[in-house]
Image: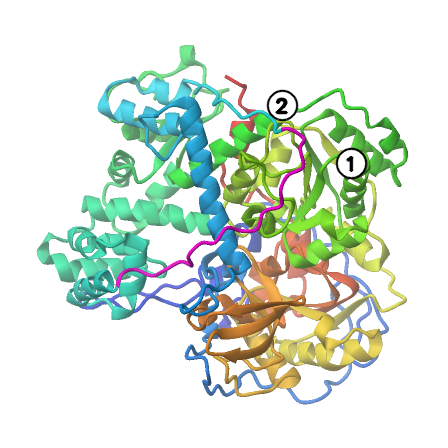
Amino acid sequence: MTALPRGETPGSPAADDDGVVAPPSAVPAPSTGDEPHAADEGSPTADDTGDGAETDGQDTATDDDTDASGAPGAGDESGNAEGETAEAGTDTTPAPLSATKNENSSTDEDQSENAEGETAEAGTDTTPAPLSEAEAELAAQRELRERIEKRKAEKEGPIAAGAKLSGKAADLLAAVRAVESGEQPATSFFDSPAPAAPRRTAPTPAPARPRAPEPARAPQGAPPEAVAATAAVLAEGGAPAALAGPAAETLGAQAAEALRADPWQLLAVPGVGPEQADGFARALLGAECGPDDGRRTAALVGWLLERAALRGHTALDASEVRAALAERSVTDPGAAVQHAVAEGVVLVFQDGQEDPEDQEPGAPAESTEGPIAAEAAEAAEHAEPAGQEPVQVLLGLDRYALAEESLADGLARLVNACERDADWTEAASAASSSSAAELIRAVAAHGLVAHTGGEAARAEPAALITAARALGLRALGTVHSVDGRRRLAGATGDPETAVTLAGLLSGAQGPGRDEEGAIAVDLLVVLDAPQLDVETAAMLVESLADGTRLVLSGDPGVLGSAGAGRVFADVLAARACPQVVSRTPDPGPIGELVSGIGIGELNQVEAPGKEVVIVPVRDAGEAVHRTVQLVADSVPRAIGVPSSDTQVITVGHGGSAGTRALNAALKQRLNPGPGRFGGFDPGDRVVHVPAPGRVVPAVVVSADAEGLRLDCAGTEIVVAQERVESSVRHGWALSAHQAAGMRWPAVVVVLPGDAAQGLSRSWVYTAFGRGERHLSVVHGVDQALPRAVAQPPAQERTTRLRTLLEAPAG
């Protein structure tokens, strides 16, 4: 990696991490700095760095005459800069909206969509207003969970492990409790297979009734009296009053009592760090407060795993947790982990091959004494004999553990319940390509199929959907974004065949559900599968009836989901189903460039139509200046793509050329204004985050007493005033994680020198592949780019799904 110039903060995920340390006497307000998400996806981690691809001698292009093309590498500096550098700020005069835009609250790439968005609320309290898509989605998800729990309870009877859990998930928790109480030996927790839960049969093929989202009340805040009581306790501990509302919402109506009894529960409130919680606890407890207080260590363990989930992990190695606890002044991290498991804060899992006859004395599978957490700690500290794979001990939060268990069970159910003698030979022979025919034949014989390929390969799932509908099947495709839905509908020629995943789960789009709550389809194709997080995937699979065929399709080279898990990668790695690899290459110079990046090569490409242009820069200031020129003048004039169809992509939100700085400069040039609507003006390009993990591009229309009015691809959305600051951002410039799953006619990728540490092969692959007709690369990272491309991708996330899928059925 090249050294960072003049100590500038890199615009990588780690650069935006907050590190506020509270003084002992008071607790500062929670930091609005960015949460790190994808150190796993934003920076290379492998030990061996491959040789950089040859880039010397490649041509470059000026803003005015974009006549050179090639791979982003070293080259001659382009001509003199045009125009004046856009200023990176605008005046803001709040008008009908009371919330003032605070760009600094934006999270970094992988987490802006994961940690900040909540469902936007629109309308007033005087008359029932129609639900927004986000509200309908949340209501439908709650209803679905309740219906699933009720149905399973009726079929299986009460489960002692908990009234709200059923099947294998409940058995998992019941086993933990039984071992801790001494009712069962510890080996039953790790080794005893849980009985498979009965599954519903496939619904009758009667036409399903389309169903609109049922009315549901919008999410409400905590009761005023609970907020007031919480504020009083926070004031005693020197914490800011602004935390009262979030604390009451997070901890419930008894938040004040909970905080007084356990001040470290403040860590559960978004934005609060250990230093802040420690300061609050010291003020409340005085001499009773200590670094090894069981309440503190348990809260820290939970907080560490929550932070890991923001980076995509569903579990962490126990040794990593102990090391992190030691860094935070815990004198006995092993005991702290044991205590957290005993308190039910986390669950513990063992993965690895063992030979019971060869185990050393005291190994976990042989031990039946002491709490289960002690066995986990002992297993992590003892190596296996030579020739055996060491046992890995993982710690995980129950929500992700149960989601992975449910997803693994659901995928196995679809595999086993499929009708295997279907004859789709005629449909396969009529397919437009050999890859499409192969996909059709695989789906005809299997209930679960994985399909991989680039952008051009999306034609193959589209052909599958068309063929299945011609056979009389209820076939449907679901995608990650509104833009993806548009592209899929164009490929199939039928808008009814494409829905967004959020719309499908909420009931706002798609065919509706049958009487048992299952989505009324015979074949569901999930495109953009790498964007599936484990909780959404579990909910989707649980919504499919027995006999439904499921296809997971996507490009394994792109960045992963905003939420926890790596579902598509785990399914591929576990070889849990047939895999169809597309042989359809992406066309044109951009396709050739991106295909090379996918295999670790940064090749020079011929671009006679100026499809790929390199613009070298010396520093971040010049990078911002050149980016504004490209979007406002050069690309519209030389390529014919208007500014409104050109998207800027950069590594992070912070830094001198991050999304915040670029959006400020682009607004000043393209749509100057005072930001009178909560920091926005009519005509501003923005992104709306209605729910965690979802990014919806939009344009500001106006604002009134109800909120900020946005135009999202022809659909009007009203974002309530109190939600604007947390769920709306300027959108001329996005991070690669935000841009995943979408494409634009022209893309400008900005790589300033301080972004070198945030680059990885998957990041470059994703960013460079977003352009349909044109790609400009504002290049200031020198040889860091070819090094990042050449470095083999590592498994960035720790999950259990692959192990669960590979485990033999018990």
Is 343 or 225 nearer to us in this picture? Answer: 225
Report x, y in % for residue 603: 79, 56
Let me know if residue 211 is in the magenta part. yes
What amino acid does circle 2 point to?
A: Ala
Is 412 or 808 nearer to us in this picture? Answer: 412
Q: Which residue is mark 1?
A: 468
Q: In the rendered view, would you say 636 is above or below 211? A: below
Q: Residue furthest top?
A: 357
Q: Callout 2: helix, strand or loop?
A: helix
What amino acid does circle 1 point to?
A: Ala
Give how far apart the Cα atoms at labels 2 and 1 are.
18 Å
In the image, is 683 to the left or to the right of 265?
right
Report x, y in % for residue 369: 24, 20
In the image, is 15 to the left or to the right of 645?
left
Q: Over which residues does the magenta segment extend?
A: 204-223
Residue 631 - label: none
Residue at x-position 90% and y-position 35%:
430
Q: In the rendered view, would you say 227 is above or below 262? A: below
Label located before the other in sequence (2 or 1): 2
User: Magenta part mainly helix, strand or loop?
Assistant: loop
From where the camera sits, is residue 327 visible?
Answer: yes
Residue at x-position 60% and y-position 85%:
668
Q: Which residue is mark 2?
A: 417
Residue at x-position 67% and y-position 60%:
785
Q: Which image quarter holds the N terminus?
A: bottom right
